[in-house]
Image (spheres, rainbow, N blue to C red):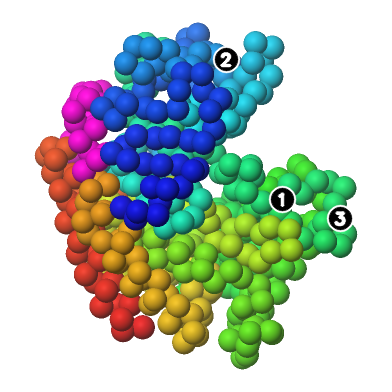
Amino acid sequence: MGTRTLLKCTLILVSFITFSCNTNNDKGDAIPADLIPVFNLDTFGNPIPGNPKINAQLSISIDSETSFEGKIAIESRGSSSQNFPKKSYNFETRDANNQDVDVALLGLPEEEDWVLIGPYSDKTLIRNIFIYDLFREMGNYSSRSVLVELNLNDEHQGVYLLSEKLKRDNNRIDISKLNPDENSGEDLTGGYILQIDRDDEEKLNDSFTSNYQPPFAQRGQQVTFVYEEPGADEITDQQKNYIQNYIFGFEDALASQDFTDPVTGYLSYINVSSFIDFFLINELANNVDAYRLSTYITKDKNGKLNMGPVWDFNYSLGNVDYCSAGETNVWAYTFNERCGDHDQQVPFWWSRLLEDPAFVVQLKDRWSKLRNDEFSLNSLNLMIDNYSTLLKETGAAERNFMTWDILGTDVHPNNFVGETYDDEINYLKDWISDRLNWMDDAIDAL
């Protein structure tokens, strides 16, 4: 692991101990390295719907000692993952009067909005936390996360990931809050959070589309930008116009003949380093959803566009059997060339950026630095070993697959089916080794 990250105050990860500078957790901030917290969730017999949230009671214990106990409101979450029997959830912490209240769960910075991700098709159980932690190792914000076990109405549900919901917050996406009365001048310039995602009917009033058709799109598909913050129920017309025009201006500059010009080209619109880090981690993972789904973009007040944070890597790192996403020797950004009929397509940005020699030089330099530190095979394997050892030695992995008897079973979209948990972990490590070797050559050839 990168030594500089061990000095960071926001989150330190050593042998899988999670800390935070926030000290509002009266049980203490550290989770013992050899223990996994247990979530006990009681919905009073009620099923958890997709919407709206229902009231429930949550207690969290570490080695049988209660770390948190209180009211929550919870709903199921996800798109394709909704088809799995193991569900994922959004929840809000509530006070005695059933009002939202900020809580420092497991030592993570105080907030009211949380996510419980239930890995199902990812039989390593760790792809998300691995990438989130790695992205922070690179010096970026990503959702702080903790491996936990979940009991729902006294029934064991297996291994879950407690994660921070991606939202504007001083301890999460740290950008300016944009209020409804900020509609002109400097106030209007930020902060915004957008997401490139599905263009389903529910989001018709929550989104806008690019003026540029994605390359190789076979059915006239469009790239959709969804308003995350301010959301559709808060964002004003002036704010919509501003962020739309900023995106359109960036795309026009990038598509122009003089796109590399430092004044009139794309450089005046984006923070290049954020685009490079976003590109490299998604390419490392050969993330099939990269650039086209769950893709977050932020813009702070008086700032440029930043890519990220990253989100949702269950369908990555060799775990996908379609569109060559399980292969180690293809670029994720060329998804459209292989699967131009899919509803969501990759915008033209990435292929165009790679036409700029200066961008490529900066990308190569960043790759070289990462390969000698955070992306070294030894560092990545150590991270994987820390997670998998914890899950095995606590018995959490075994209990997960007693509840969900899917080892040795092909669960969509598995590209590999291991007979044992160790098989899944070894496949992940071998896949990453092959991917690194291919990317070394492919990036050198750019």
Q: Nearer the viewer, mark 1 or mark 3?
A: 1
The amino acid on which the numbered mark 3 sits, given as a three-letter code, is Asn
| Residue beneath the point at 71% across and 45% down | 231
| Residue beneath the point at 48% across and 80% down | 359
In the image, the segment drawn in magenta is 385-412
Q: Could you tell me how far apart the alpha carbons at marks 1 and 3 are, in whole angstroms?
A: 14 Å
Residue 340 seen anywhere in this rendered image of the structure = no
Residue located beneath label 1 in the image: 176
- At label 3, counting other C-alpha atoms closer than 10 Å, the crowd grade (few under 14, some 14-19, many 20 or more) is some
Residue located beneath label 2 in the image: 71
| Residue beneath the point at 13% across and 37% down | 420
Residue located beneath label 3 in the image: 183
Does residue 388 belong to the magenta stretch? yes
Q: Is residue 41 above or below residue 313?
A: above
Secondary structure category for the residue under label 2: strand
The amino acid on which the numbered mark 2 sits, given as a three-letter code, is Lys
Q: Which residue lies furthest to the bottom in this view?
A: 257
Secondary structure category for the residue under label 1: loop
